[in-house]
Image: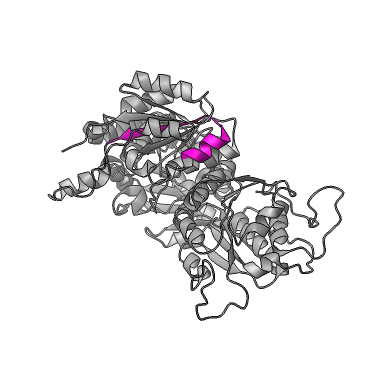
């Protein structure tokens, strides 16, 4: 976020305007957002937040109106993931703020910089209930359970400091969602304020040099290295690839790390941490470098493996060194800075040093390093094959359709995903993505209904890029009303839905337990017709070839297009 303003910006809505020394709280909110480079916000106006909305147009901030606050949160989340800039959502009080709480929880789980601004009860609101509209006991206490912090301001002048505090977290630490509450009487009050406060510019933190040398020494002598990449490695794609090729190390990613190293690269295992074969390989590696990942159960779909070798963890969050699997070597700092430092130590005496040679001699280790890349590529190919063999029967229903999608999509396409079988069993391992593209998945918290509103957010950030939502019929109906938002925006937006007649994963889990499936079979909905009712388009396809043709049309047709792929429903 270093391209955002770092100098004080006057409280003026446009060139030639007179500085307002006593803005309202609503204007103070908007001016602080504009000063930090915010150009787009998502939300729904309500009785208590109208003073904020009044000032959005004069400050040049565009607004997208989803049909539900949860959709606003998911849209802002996806906007942040693809643009690298914080996503901003505005709600009103009470139920509106609680509606967005699930999206805030998802952003917390996936380390997404999301700012939610809401009104709150008046400054002198009585402790006992007074029956005020949208009254609840404590909005800040509710949001503290899902956000990094919830800041209730006590003056108009404090608003700028609260916004700067949020952006400081986004820029300098592990980015996580923040809630700022402005008492509704302060939104309307005009008070003198100083210059807009701005968060400090981002300065990448470097790890301790002795830890860098320890990591480099372990990697230099490793015979079975591995790289595990999470979402925290997103800004270090070039360094990750350089290190993998330097070491001859296969690369496996979490869902949030998907595509950091091109999944078509011979060393890439893609999103395969759930594979027993890959987990056994990791357990047998003598050095594992994990970058920007929790190594969590939600990534592995099981308890973390017992690693027999040295674990090096690189993460901006020092707490990650002790969470889950404890690091033997800790690189606390910016991922790109940490990996560049490691590569520099490996190359201290020239490239030969990384191969274990002196500058003027050859060694048996040099021959080993010369062939390590070819050996690592063969290993990666074997592991990919083992992963696919483990799930071939289960995943066969999705793979041909996903290949058809990949053949139509551009390299920089954005795919938004849902907590659906077609996504976590299908697309995560079987729909390859490269560094130019993105795949956005609700990991960890695992909310349903993410894909469609997230696609709206991604398309808002980059209208010229292809964006496709991928979902199941159950998950889609958590946020299907956002078809109206997409129709109003008129951007081409395909929504591919694998329809298995309900909650397929829970149905399968009940069956595996020996239970009679209960409450998981849903009445079929004519989703293409529903899309047309919202002002979009729809089609049903029954082959990969039909999906490819429908997707190609949808990518050039204004508005949303639902393309359903019916699946057999077990009875």
Q: Nearer the viewer, residue 502 or 260?
A: 502
Residue 436 position, x and y percent, is: 54, 32
Apparent side of residue 213 relative to residue 511 in the rendered image (left or right)? right
Magenta span includes 186: no
The residue furthest left is 514
Quadrant occupied by the C terminus: top left
- Residue 487: percent from left, percent from top: 52, 35
Q: Disc count in the image? A: 0
Q: Is residue 34 left or right of residue 418?
A: right
Residue at 47%, 53% (x, y): give it.
103
Q: Between residue 421 and residue 295, name the one nearer to us.
A: 421
Look at the image and give the residue range highlighted in magenta: 483-500
Q: As rendered, which of 533 and 531 lies closer to the eye?
A: 533
Question: Which x, y percent locates residue 7?
Answer: 78, 55
Give coordinates of residue 118: x percent, y percent: 58, 61
The one of 294 and 250 positioned closer to us in this rendering: 294
Task: Say whether residue 355 is visible.
Answer: no
Say above or below: 287 vs 194: above
Query: Residue at left 39%, top 54%?
Result: 445
- Where 558 falls versus 438 (above or below)? above
Q: Quadrant of residue 543?
A: top left
Is 534 above or below relative to 178? above
What coloring was used for the rendering?
one colour
Query: Do we see residue 100 in this rendering?
Result: yes
Task: Please tell me whether residue 432 is drawn above or below residue 314 in the rendered image.
Answer: above
Query: In the rendered image, which quarter is residue 528 located in?
Result: top left
Q: Is residue 374 left or right of residue 343?
A: left
């Amino acid at each position: 976020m270093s391209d955002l303003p770092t100098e004080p910006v006057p409280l003026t809505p446009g060139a030639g305007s007179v500085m307002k020394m006593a803005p309202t709280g609503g204007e103070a909110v908007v001016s602080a957002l504009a000063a930090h480079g915010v150009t787009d916000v998502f939300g729904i106006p309500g009785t208590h937040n109208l003073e904020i909305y009044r000032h959005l147009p004069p400050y040049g901030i565009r607004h997208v109106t989803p049909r539900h606050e949860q959709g606003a949160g998911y849209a802002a989340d996806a906007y942040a993931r693809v643009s690298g800039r914080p996503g901003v959502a505005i709600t009103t009080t009470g139920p509106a703020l609680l509606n967005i709480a699930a999206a805030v929880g998802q952003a917390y789980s996936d380390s997404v910089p999301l700012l939610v601004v809401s009104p709150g009860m008046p400054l002198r609101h009585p402790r006992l209930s007074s029956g005020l509209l949208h009254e609840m006991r404590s909005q800040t206490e509710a949001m503290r359970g899902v956000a990094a912090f919830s800041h209730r301001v006590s003056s108009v002048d404090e608003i700028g400091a609260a916004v700067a505090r949020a952006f400081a977290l986004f820029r300098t630490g592990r980015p996580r969602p923040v809630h700022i509450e402005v008492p509704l009487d302060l939104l309307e009050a005009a008070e003198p304020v100083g210059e807009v406060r701005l968060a400090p510019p981002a300065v990448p933190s470097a790890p301790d040099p002795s830890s860098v040398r320890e990591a480099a020494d372990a990697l230099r002598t490793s015979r079975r290295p591995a790289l595990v990449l999470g979402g925290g490695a997103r800004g270090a794609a070039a360094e990750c690839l350089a290190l993998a090729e330097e070491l001859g190390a296969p690369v496996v990613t979490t869902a949030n790390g998907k595509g950091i190293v091109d999944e078509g690269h011979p060393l890439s295992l893609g999103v395969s941490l759930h594979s027993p074969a890959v987990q056994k390989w990791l357990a047998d590696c003598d050095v594992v470098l994990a970058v920007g990942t929790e190594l969590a159960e939600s990534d592995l779909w099981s308890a973390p493996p017992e690693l027999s070798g040295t674990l090096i963890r690189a993460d901006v969050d020092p707490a990650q060194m002790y969470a889950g699997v404890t690091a033997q070597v800790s690189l606390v700092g910016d991922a790109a800075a940490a990996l560049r430092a490691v590569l520099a130590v490996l190359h201290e005496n020239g490239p030969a040093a990384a191969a274990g040679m002196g500058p003027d001699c050859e060694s048996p280790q040099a021959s080993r390093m010369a062939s390590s890349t070819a050996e690592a590529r063969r290993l990666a190919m074997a592991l990919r094959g083992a992963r696919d063999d483990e799930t071939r029967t289960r995943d066969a229903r999705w793979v041909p359709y996903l290949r058809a999608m990949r053949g139509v999509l551009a390299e920089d396409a954005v795919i938004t995903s849902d907590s659906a079988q077609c996504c976590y069993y299908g697309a995560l391992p079987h729909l390859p993505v490269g560094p130019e593209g993105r795949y956005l998945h609700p990991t960890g918290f695992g909310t349903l209904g993410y894909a469609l509103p997230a696609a709206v957010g991604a398309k808002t950030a980059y209208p010229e890029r292809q964006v496709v939502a991928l979902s199941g019929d159950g998950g889609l109906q958590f946020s299907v009303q956002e078809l109206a938002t997409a129709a109003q925006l008129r951007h081409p937006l395909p929504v591919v839905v694998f329809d298995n007649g309900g909650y397929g994963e829970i149905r399968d889990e009940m069956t595996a337990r020996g239970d009679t499936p209960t409450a998981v079979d849903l009445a079929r909905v004519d989703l293409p017709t529903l899309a047309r009712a919202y002002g979009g388009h729809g089609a049903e396809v029954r082959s990969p070839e039909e999906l490819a043709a429908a997707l190609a049309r949808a990518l050039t047709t204004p508005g949303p297009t639902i393309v359903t792929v019916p699946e057999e429903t077990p009875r």
